[in-house]
């Protein structure tokens, strides 16, 4: 089934501070086993394998994570795990991959996937992926959206024509609008309307189509990326280090998609998508005992309910008389916070940065 | 000031499960630095030193703790740190010490002290200790009681004659009754009446007076202990191992004190006594930040109040958005529980015993 001119680009540059203290700059969320089995990026590659074999997978990440990602993904050619010299958001990142692919396969069709999401039903997901590649091969820009399950304000939305959203359908609808992260009332309206999807960052296009779009909307960045030599040339890294920092720091949504017309939208049915965005999201994914306690590692719950424990091997975590806490233990740092406030981890990390406690970051 | 025939017996046999996971069978409360500086038994010896020098201090403990106690107390002769072959409560323990002392000094006056209490104002305490030794030297049984600060149901009480309790007085009153741990209403009455003290386990008597009392009230135990050879003889340990398990398992309060008449009671003034009976008691002893958070070790409090953190060197404990928790971290076990439920640690230890997880005990 795999088409030789279909490629996947996995965006794995994220820092993932929301999983501190498990996640660190050198062990970001995507390289952690947050939901077994395997790390999130290993799961992403394994999930795509029936459609895109490892030798046609490309990964963009940051210099601190590159070696770990190579180690975790045997079969993905080393040269295809590229470290961005600086973080420049998704438009230059995808442009970089598109340019590199174009040089070796003018016919390349590129699917873009986040490295750190969880999908419970990969078979249903792959049916959509195949359909999206097919649309992209025909020259369209395609995307997979996720049916909203609540009025989330942390995601962008994609508008489908009213009455034209059939979850799981392999016939795409034409996207009418891209919408930035809404406020709560607007998010509510989107969910109630029924023709909006979460934008989950999964896009498909020919490399040539993408570079043309970049040429139109970010001509400076496109021109810079066109100067890149072959990825297998010795000059690739120094030239990348020279030109990439000069690229515009902008997301593909703002730079390209919002201006695009005729985008083919696939609305996923119940594929069990979860962006694993916080410890609370992990809690939702893990098996729980009769009192709603979930644990990764050795935990003992006494008169306790609704807690999430994450601890390394060889450590017992005993909770007595507590409710709805997140307790994350590592050899050098421990976090305790209410599960519903799991996002406040970011504030802890910011404080540590301010205190220059780099060993803990 | 020190009298050559005055000796101290420090009872250090307790297991101290209430400080799990910091306390373990081999690292019980008395050998831990729970409130700096020094471990509780080191503080006990240091506090007594102006009255009883180390060479006249005797310590009873259990076999698991003996070597650690010897290590922590240079200057206390090794032979005077005696391991009880089995736990037999305080009556046989004090009888053992009294018998051993009698053999080498028929004039010995013995003060008994718990190993694991904290006293903030040692000078005021020592004035009482000196007065109590003096009473004991004159042939009386003496004790130091603690003025109750709340209606505690976990301690025994000592009744003074109505109107005859002057805290801090060096003139003893004659104790009228010993009372077991009361229920809440009775405890309330004791506190309101004003002539009751907490029984804090500090007793004073001539060794000969104690052995006579034991002869009267526990003749079998007294007879068994009288068979002990000199503590410096090679036969001491085997004979102790033979006779001690046959002694009655009973506290000195029940066996001797409740039957005694003319006991000289000293009611302590504000000596800052604390039995360090739970993590919550430790919280009360530690300095706290503006939000009532206390920490031993490296802690970071974010929107958190009233918490106690205890963690080893090299570990950061971050608390975000939580109140009134106890968080105790060790390399192989971590405890999280509400501060007011710090006693529930015992239930955790019981569960671990039931699960035969001896490495964690």
Image: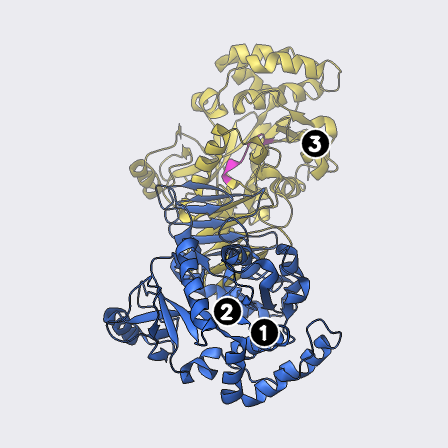
Chain colours: A blue, B yellow
Q: Is residue B71 left or right of residue A335?
A: right
**Whether residue A283 is situated above or below residue B239 in the rendered picture:** below
B144 part of magenta stretch? no
Identify the residue at image location x=33%, y=79%.
A176
Decide: few, some or many residues near mark 3? Use Cα within 10 Å; few <14, some 14-19, many ≥20: some
Alpha-carbon span between mark 1 and mark 3: 66 Å
- Badges 2 and 1: C-beta atoms under 8 Å apart? yes
Q: x%, y% of residue A299?
A: 48, 42
**Whether residue A54 is situated above or below residue B86 in the rendered picture:** below
Q: Is residue A5 left or right of residue B227?
A: left
Alpha-carbon span between mark 2 and mark 1: 10 Å
- Labelled disc at residue B67: 3
- Labelled disc at residue A112: 2
Pick the front one: B314 or B286: B314
- Labelled disc at residue A97: 1
Q: In the structure shown, which secondary structural element does the residue marked by tag 2 occupy?
A: strand
Q: Is residue A358 visible?
A: yes
Q: In the structure shown, which secondary structural element does the residue marked by tag 3 occupy?
A: helix
Residue A130 picture quarter: bottom left
Q: x%, y% of residue A119?
A: 43, 56
């Amino acid at each position: 089934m795999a088409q030789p001119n279909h490629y996947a680009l996995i965006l794995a540059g994220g820092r993932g501070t929301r999983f501190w203290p498990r996640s660190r700059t050198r062990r970001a969320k995507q390289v952690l086993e947050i939901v077994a089995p395997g790390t999130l990026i290993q799961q992403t590659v394994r999930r795509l394998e029936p459609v895109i074999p490892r030798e046609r997978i490309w990964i963009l990440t940051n210099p601190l994570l590159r070696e770990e990602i190579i180690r975790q993904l045997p079969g993905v050619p080393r040269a295809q795990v590229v470290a961005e010299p600086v973080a420049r958001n998704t438009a230059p990142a995808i442009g970089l991959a598109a340019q590199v692919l174009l040089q070796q396969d003018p016919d390349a069709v590129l699917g873009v996937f986040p490295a750190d999401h969880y999908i419970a039903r990969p078979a249903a997901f792959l049916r959509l992926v195949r359909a999206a590649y097919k649309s992209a091969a025909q020259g369209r820009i395609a995307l997979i959206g996720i049916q909203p399950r609540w009025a989330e304000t942390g995601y962008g939305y994609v508008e489908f024509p009213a009455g034209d959203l059939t979850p799981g359908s392999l016939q795409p609808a034409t996207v009418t609008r891209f919408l930035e992260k809404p406020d709560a009332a607007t998010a509510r309206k989107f969910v109630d309307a029924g023709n909006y999807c979460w934008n989950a960052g999964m896009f498909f296009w020919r490399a040539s189509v993408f570079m043309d779009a970049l040429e139109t909307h970010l001509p400076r960045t496109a021109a810079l990326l066109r100067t890149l030599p072959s990825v297998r040339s010795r000059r690739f890294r120094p030239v990348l280090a020279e030109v990439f920092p000069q690229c515009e720091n902008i997301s593909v949504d703002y730079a390209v998609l919002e201006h695009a017309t005729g985008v083919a939208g696939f609305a996923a049915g119940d594929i069990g998508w979860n962006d694993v965005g916080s410890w609370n999201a992990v809690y939702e994914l893990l098996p729980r005992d009769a009192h709603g306690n979930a644990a990764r590692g050795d935990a003992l719950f006494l008169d306790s309910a609704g807690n999430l424990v994450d601890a390394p091997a060889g450590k017992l975590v005993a909770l007595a008389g507590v409710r709805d806490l997140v307790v994350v233990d590592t050899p050098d740092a421990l976090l305790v916070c209410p599960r519903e406030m799991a996002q406040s981890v970011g504030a802890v990390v910011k404080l540590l940065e301010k205190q220059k406690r780099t060993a803990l970051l």
